[in-house]
Amino acid sequence: MNFLAHDVILPPGSAVLTRVGASLPDIWVLLPRRPLPLAIVRGLRQRADPLGVQLADGIESHMRADAVFHGHAEFQRRMAVASSHLRESVAGLRHTQLAAHVAVEMVLDRWLIDHDPGLLDRYYQSFDPASLDTACRLGSHDPESATVLRQILDRFASSAFLREYVTAKGMVARWMRSLSRTPFAENRSVDESRWVELVERWRSEFAEGSDKLIDDVRSGVEAWDKPGRSAP
């Protein structure tokens, strides 16, 4: 799941630090020394600091939501459709599965924006300086990592790049930038209009069932600690 989807599946009235925590696992990947989310969560819960527990709740929600989402039949169906379209439309594209995975998650965030235009503003309101200071202090193994994480979060909040998702061209630009940061980046020239066409196609084809997909992930996270279910 992408940033906005992780945010909307949180319980209503979740603390600001919980909302920030739900974004951290996808931001930690940019750190030179990436922390282990489970280790951070365990440490925060052992300390029993109320603010740390709020942050841990968000991080844990992220991990559980990803597990439910990636195992959901609708996600797998969308992956198959997007991968097929990519193979048909972009000759010789390598790492089709990765490109499809990123796109499917971004298109779901776009669907959320389409159905709740105020979502972006509410999301970014959580990234206030005081909350980011606390999240970096509690969500890092050492002061050096906390400083680097704070710099990354500052850029994340100030750039507000999720607002680019409101147009197909903006989504394509962000999609390509996301892929360029992976070990599988490809140095190739691709007609932008082809990517835009695909994004608009998926936006239309994946709209149906998105509300149920979000509800199912939310329910799966809520039911995680019930008997018969194990942690990720």
Image: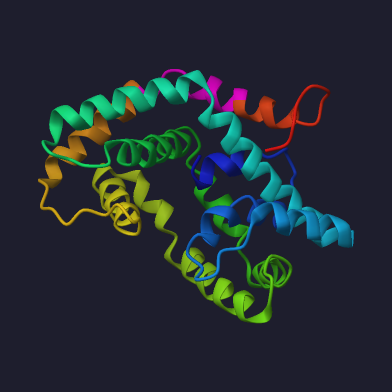
Answer left or right for 69 relative to 107.
Answer: right
**In this view of the protein, can residue 187 be seen by the observer?**
yes
Please, is residue 176 above or below residue 113 in the view? below
Residue 19, x across and y down, in percent: 66, 51
Q: Is residue 97 magenta?
A: no
Residue 229, x across and y down, in percent: 75, 26
Q: Give 73 or 200, whichever is nearer the viewer.
A: 73
Q: Main secondary structure of the magenta part?
A: helix
Residue at 43% across, 23% down:
76
Q: Give 164 or 226, whichever is nearer the viewer.
A: 226
> What segment is highlighted magenta in the picture?
206-216
Residue 49, x across and y down, in percent: 87, 62
Please, is residue 84 above or below residue 188 in the view? above
Answer left or right for 63 relative to 75.
Answer: right
Residue 29, x across and y down, in percent: 50, 59
**In this view of the protein, can residue 49 be seen by the observer?**
no
Q: Give 223 or 202, whichever is nearer the viewer.
A: 223
* Quadrant of the drawing holding the C terminus: top right
Q: How is the image coloured?
A: rainbow
Q: Is residue 212 magenta?
A: yes
Residue at 64% across, 72% down:
129
